[in-house]
Structures are given as C-alpha cells and as structure tokens.
Image (cartoon, rainbow, N blue to C red):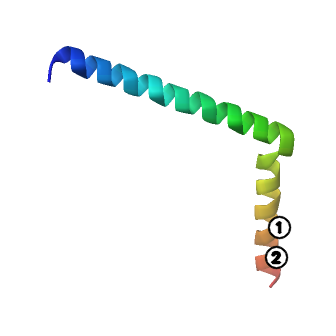
Amino acid sequence: MHLEDLLTNKRSRLALGGLLLASFSIIWWVGADVGQVGHIGADLRAYLDGARSIA
C-alpha cells in the first residue's frame, strides 16, 4: 500500500464517521424534539426501578 492510499482511506473513514455522527445527532435531536425520547426513556426506567423495589 502507498502512503496516498492510507491517507485517502483514513480521510474517507473520518468523513464517513463524521457523516454518521452528524446524521445520528440530527435524528436524535428531531426524535427528542418530537417525542421527547430521552425523557420518556428516563421516566420508564425510573418507573420500572420503583416497581421492582416495591415488589
């Protein structure tokens, strides 16, 4: 392998990782904005923990 190939592969991997991270962040932001995914998940977890400690 040549040095150019390594640089190109690394650069393309970084670009792909950045693209995935950006798309995930947008999906999470939109999902949290619309359905408040994080709050629902945390409330559900707290409810299940409470139910487990009572039972």
**Quadrant in the rendering for residue 11:** top left
In the displayed structure, would residue 7 be above or below residue 18? above
Residue that badge 2 annotates: 51
In this orientation, which residue lies closer to the viewer: 46 or 29? 29
Badge 2 amino acid = Ala
Taking the spot 65% from the left edge, 33% from the top edge, the residue there is 25
Image-based side of 41 in relation to 23, left or right: right
- Given the current orientation, which residue lies at the most extreme left position? 1
**Dot 1 crowding, Cα within 10 Å, few <14, some 14–19, many 20+:** few
**Quadrant in the rendering for residue 23:** top right
Image marks 2 and 1: residues in contact by CB distance under 8 Å: yes
**Quadrant in the rendering for residue 35:** top right
In the displayed structure, would residue 50 be above or below residue 13? below
Give the percent coordinates (x, y) of residue 54: 83, 81
Residue that badge 1 annotates: 47
Badge 1 amino acid = Tyr
Whole-angstrom CA distance, mark 2 to mark 1, is 6 Å
